[in-house]
Image (tube, grey):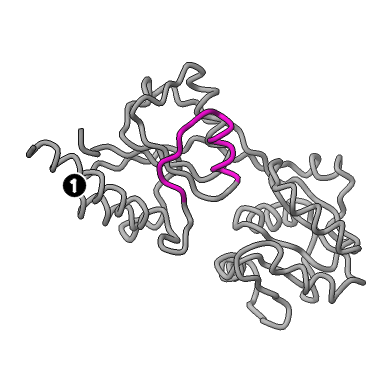
């Protein structure tokens, strides 16, 4: 059977400019979007229970757009006026650009990494006298606190939002040709909703090493691994895989 139906375990982003819509059109496949996880923001009391006072910190480390949203949401609800002297360190350019939603963009106060957290460690070490706040979800890559601890700087983690599994009972059966996952929490959600899930002939696509590891630990066979030098994006990898897979199916039918 050729590949006809793909399920992306996240909501559609980018609107009509989404590369997945272009992929659906070019390859004549159905692509469905269903968020496997839900994000629940922490309350002011949750932050206080962690003994976190935003005013104690001079630098904020942002590792995701959600961390940006929740930091400023809680700053407002806790009546903390973020000073114009605050420094920001963003793991990627995309996060730094997103930060403009909340502040007047000044490069002198924003340091931007290339892609991974280790890219910003030299900057953190340079300003070792500063006090660093790391807003995050309840799920955090262990290498991040490890790197910060080795940097010998004052830092604290603030859990500002939590990730929970969505109720996927509306799916009934996960009968798709390809399932696409972007983080370990989505793998967890799959098995919490479908404890007897059997992969059978379903193809699995994962983005990032942590997602790949989670899928492998769950006993899944991974067919598409992203990113790679050749395919930095999931849409590119899917397009190439569909092209090759459907071509093989077509040749076999001719024989």
Query: Is 180 or 49 nearer to us in this picture?
Result: 180
Q: Residue at x 83, y 63 (%)?
A: 132
Percent position (x, y) of residue 103?
65, 71
Residue 54 included in the magenta stretch of the image: no
Percent position (x, y) of residue 215?
53, 35
Question: Dot 1 surroundings within 10 Å: few (below 14), some, or many (20 or more)?
Answer: few
Query: Is 132 or 176 nearer to us in this picture?
Result: 176
Q: Disc 1 designates what residue?
A: 247
Q: Check the picture and name the quadrant holding the N terminus.
A: top left
Q: Residue at x 58, y 67 (%)?
A: 101
Residue farthest toward the top in the current orientation of the protein: 196
Percent position (x, y) of residue 151?
86, 64
Against 113, residue 157 (above or below) is above
Q: Check the picture and name the quadrant holding the C terminus.
A: top left
Percent position (x, y) of residue 167?
50, 26
Magenta region: 210-225
Q: Residue at x 37, y 26 (%)?
A: 174
Q: Kindly state the secondary structure of the residue where label 1 is placed.
A: helix
190 left or right, relative to 16: right
Residue 211 included in the magenta stretch of the image: yes
Query: Is 79 or 32 nearer to us in this picture?
Result: 32
Against 35, residue 145 (above or below) is below
Q: Residue at x 54, y 35 (%)?
A: 216
44 left or right, relative to 200: right
């Amino acid at each position: 059977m050729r590949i006809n139906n793909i399920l992306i375990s996240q909501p559609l982003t980018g609107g009509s400019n989404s590369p997945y819509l272009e992929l659906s059109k070019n390859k004549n496949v159905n692509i469905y979007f269903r968020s496997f996880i839900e994000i629940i923001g922490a309350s002011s009391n949750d932050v206080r229970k962690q003994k976190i006072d935003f005013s104690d910190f001079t630098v904020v480390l942002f590792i995701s757009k959600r961390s940006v949203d929740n930091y400023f949401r809680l700053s407002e609800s806790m009546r903390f006026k973020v000073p114009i002297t605050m420094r920001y360190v963003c793991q990627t350019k995309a996060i730094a650009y997103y930060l403009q939603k909340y502040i007047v963009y000044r490069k002198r106060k924003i340091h931007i990494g290339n892609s991974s957290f280790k890219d910003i460690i030299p900057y953190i070490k340079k300003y070792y006298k500063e006090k660093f706040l790391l807003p995050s979800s309840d799920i955090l890559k262990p290498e991040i606190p490890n790197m910060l601890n080795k940097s010998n700087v004052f830092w604290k983690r603030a859990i500002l939002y939590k990730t929970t599994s969505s109720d996927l009972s509306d799916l009934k059966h996960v009968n798709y040709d390809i399932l696409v996952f972007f983080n370990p929490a989505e793998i967890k959600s799959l098995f919490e909703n479908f404890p007897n899930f059997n992969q059978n002939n379903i193809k699995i696509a994962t983005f990032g090493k942590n997602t790949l590891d989670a899928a492998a630990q769950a006993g899944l066979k991974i067919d598409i691994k992203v990113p790679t030098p050749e395919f930095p994006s999931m849409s590119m990898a899917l397009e190439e895989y569909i092209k090759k897979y459907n071509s093989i199916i077509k040749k076999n039918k001719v024989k």
